[in-house]
Image (cartoon, rainbow, N blue to C red):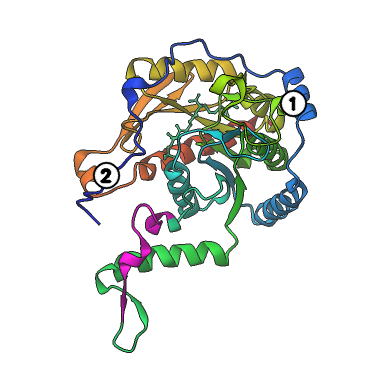
Amino acid sequence: MSGDKRVHTSVPDTETAIDRNLPEFPAAKPIDEDNYFRLHKPPPYLSQISRDVAEFINYHHLQKRKIVLVTSGGTTVPLENNTVRFIDNFSAGTRGATSAEYFLENGYAVVFLHREFSLLPYSRHYSHTTNCFLDYMTESEDGKVEVNAEFQKEMIVVLRKYRHVQNNNLLLLVPFTTVHQYLFTLKLIAQELSVIGSDALFYLAAAVSDFFLPSSRVPEHKIQSQESGGKLVVDLEPVPKFLSRLVDSWAPISMIVSFKLETDSSILIKKSKGALERYNHQLVIGNLLQTRKHEVVFVTKDSERWVRLSQDQVDAGIDIESLIIPEVIELHKSSIEEKKKMGL
Ligand SMILES: CC(C)(COP(=O)(O)O)[C@@H](O)C(=O)NCCC(=O)N[C@@H](CSSC[C@H](N)C(=O)O)C(=O)O
């Protein structure tokens, strides 16, 4: 549906973005991991997820299929246990959901660790926000719901891909909402995936909170505005940077790709290289909030290379993930060969 005339309010005003020149928090150490997971209760549903993930991994590993964990969407930091207010991280889930589709089309099985109710592979094309599915429908003469003739061609392609993925059990949807749920689930899935070693790929597109409220300081009920003189003062702690534990301990043989999100182009590559040096993983994909849908930069230990859509590709509605994913898959293939040479 071109020529969208609607007002959009979800694009942040980057002029007021926080100063990202502040030094990064240190990578998490084993003691940080022990403290965090000991002091916070695991989500009550974790054992169910563990069973589902183990079954999914086993099913695909037997078929020698590579598996990618795609994380997608933003994590929340609740300010009350009976949550009325929370701090959210910006992410619609487009990067993750679109990337998952291209991994699936390239033969991967996908564990999709996503913010509940954010965009999902395939249904993202007709979600309530982008293209309301009702706009694609008409009522036939005998009162039946039908898809408009003009959309049949486009929709049958998406529907066939969606059905193929469903019928072959290629996509496992695992939700999160809070940063705690995300971190507990990320650790669990990483440790389950570590059994398939270099055939597992981690593609961390989720926007993870940098700060959180330790559970010991979260009030049970809605904070009353007349308390503390009508102000709401929140004292947050930095979220341990568990990417280091993922690399060093949870899935040490797997290839790990993280995303670096900035709004200031002058620090993007420096920050991406900083993340690579700090966590010692294989690839950081840097992207700017303002241009993330048509350009990204691949930063490895010894290179930085922009991947961009041409104006014609932008006009044709090509997804930049159609360029990103094949490049990531090539790097994963090389990583697997390297690990096999090392006997891993
Ligand atoms: C979120 C977006 C921009 C996609 O947007 P939508 O298409 O609207 O969903 C994604 O491309 C991205 O940059 N994701 C990463 C964003 C992010 O928060 N990255 C962190 C590093 S990864 S989060 C920290 C890591 N899990 C750890 O524990 O150390 C950063 O920039 O600092």
Q: Nearer the viewer, residue 225 or 51?
A: 225
Mark carried by residue 216: 1
Q: For ligand 1, tell me if the residue under mark 2 lies within 8 Å.
A: no
- Magenta stretch bounds: 124-139
Question: Is 236 left or right of 271, judged from the image as shown?
Answer: right
Question: Is residue 276 positioned above or below 203 on the image?
Answer: above
Determine if the magenta segment contains residue 130: yes
Q: Amino acid at mark 2?
A: Val
Please tell me which residue is depicted at 37% across the width and 45% down the height of the picture: 322
Mark carried by residue 7: 2
Residue 284 is situated, as x and y percent measured from the top left of the image, at: 48, 26
Q: Earlier in the sequence, mark 1 or mark 2?
A: 2
Q: Amino acid at mark 1?
A: Ser
Determine if the magenta segment contains residue 186: no
Q: Nearer the viewer, residue 339 or 85?
A: 85
Separation (CA) of disc 1 from disc 2: 41 Å
